[in-house]
Amino acid sequence: MSGGLLCLLFSNTGVAAPDKTKQNLDDLKQQIVAEKQSLTKDNKQQQQLQSQLKKDDLAIASNAQKINAISKDKAEVEKQLDKLGKQQADLNRKRQQQEQVLAEQIRSAYYAGHHDYLKLLLNQQDPNEVSRNLTYYQYLNEARVASIDDYKSVIKDLLDVEREQRQQADKLSQLIDEQQQQKQALESNRKQRQATLKQINSKILSSKQRLTKLEEEEKSLIQALARLQAMQQEAWELNGLGKFKNKLQWPVQGRITHAFGQRKQGYLRWKGVLMSAPVGKPVYTIHNGTVLFADWLKGYGLVVVIDHGKGYMSLYGHNQTLLKKVGDRVEIGEPIALVGQSGGQNKAGVYFEIRHKGKPVNPKHWCK
């Protein structure tokens, strides 16, 4: 700016006239005011775009959460239909057996000569023989009545099962339709996020601007973690991660695209690792703990932070949706989120950190 000022104040032959100098100074002031206004406008646009990005990420998270819930409901309905199918097969076997029993009883009655009670009484001379025959026929009749009742009961149960099958099939059809609608909404929100991200990237032109953006994002994360550390309390036998070096599983199965300590931008370095993974895959907690934070964070998208005790915390960012809320207790290997690209990522993956007493440590020393 000093070179421009000299050009305005001095000519090739010497110092400009006072009136000319005053005019040049006024022009320069106007330029400075215009630059400040432009900068303020750009900052405001950036804030609006970041707000829009958060809105897009949360909309995607809501869609993904509904799809996840619908998938569970579908699995339960399909399980119920399978159970009903087995019940139906069992009842059909019972029905066939009872039909065979009834048919045999009818044949036995036919071969006995179609005698009725009156004929038996008239044709039999021995009272004991009459009594025995009457008892025999009574048993046969009772057996037939019992078989018929059993048959009617099986038919009723079979009809109930078939009715419930139709209801469950209708429910499954509705869930499939709802899932398809949510998938369409998810795709629409993804396109909206891509448009927002394109606008954000078009506003960040220089490496200095990118560095400033990353500094702000890292500062926001550090402040959030500091607040969480101040709030965290020891709970339900949380003994930290000190004894689990090289024993824990990674939160997702994927390739590490950015390693701990690698240069990020300018003097900034990665405080954790960025792991590539397919969208929608589960993100697992590395160990037992309590959820301290579950929300959207600038630059990191939807984030889960878990307290493992003894000053140890793990962080999982860029999720598509969160499956846990603040205060939830989680067990080792439990799903806590789904892989996504929230926070402005172009590719799906998980940003993963481990911190001890607020200081980031290399996750490779804990996970194998």
Image (spheres, rainbow, N blue to C red):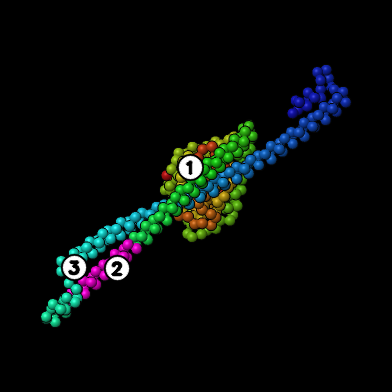
3D distance between C-alphas at marks 2 and 1: 57 Å
Marks 3 and 2, how far apart at CA: 18 Å
The quadrant of the image that shows the N terminus is top right
Q: Which of marks 3 and 2 is in front?
A: 3
Q: Is residue 160 left or right of residue 309?
A: left
Instruction: Looking at the image, tell me whether mark 2 or mark 1 is earlier in sequence order.
Output: 2
Q: Indicate the position of residue 177 as horizontal and vertical percent values.
A: 48, 47
Dot 1: element = loop
Image position of 2 with respect to 308: above or below? above
Report the residue at 58% width, 56% height from top: 231
Report the magenta residues as a range. Answer: 134-156
Residue 366 visible within the image: no
State the residue position of label 2.
149
Element under disc 3: helix
Residue closer to the observer: 32 or 107:
107
> Which residue is most to the bottom?
127
**In the figure, is residue 150 to the left or right of 27?**
left
Q: Which of 129 and 30 is in front in this view?
A: 129
Which of marks 3 and 1 precedes in the sequence?
A: 3
- Residue at 37%, 61% (x, y): give it: 160
Q: Can residue 171 be seen at all in this image of the molecule? A: yes
- The residue carrying mark 1 is 279
Tag 3 residue: 109
SS of the residue at dot 2? helix
Camera-side mark, 1 or 3: 3
The residue type indicated by label 2 comes to: Asp
Q: Which amino acid does label 3 sit on?
A: Ala
Q: In the image, is residue 363 above or below residue 108? A: above
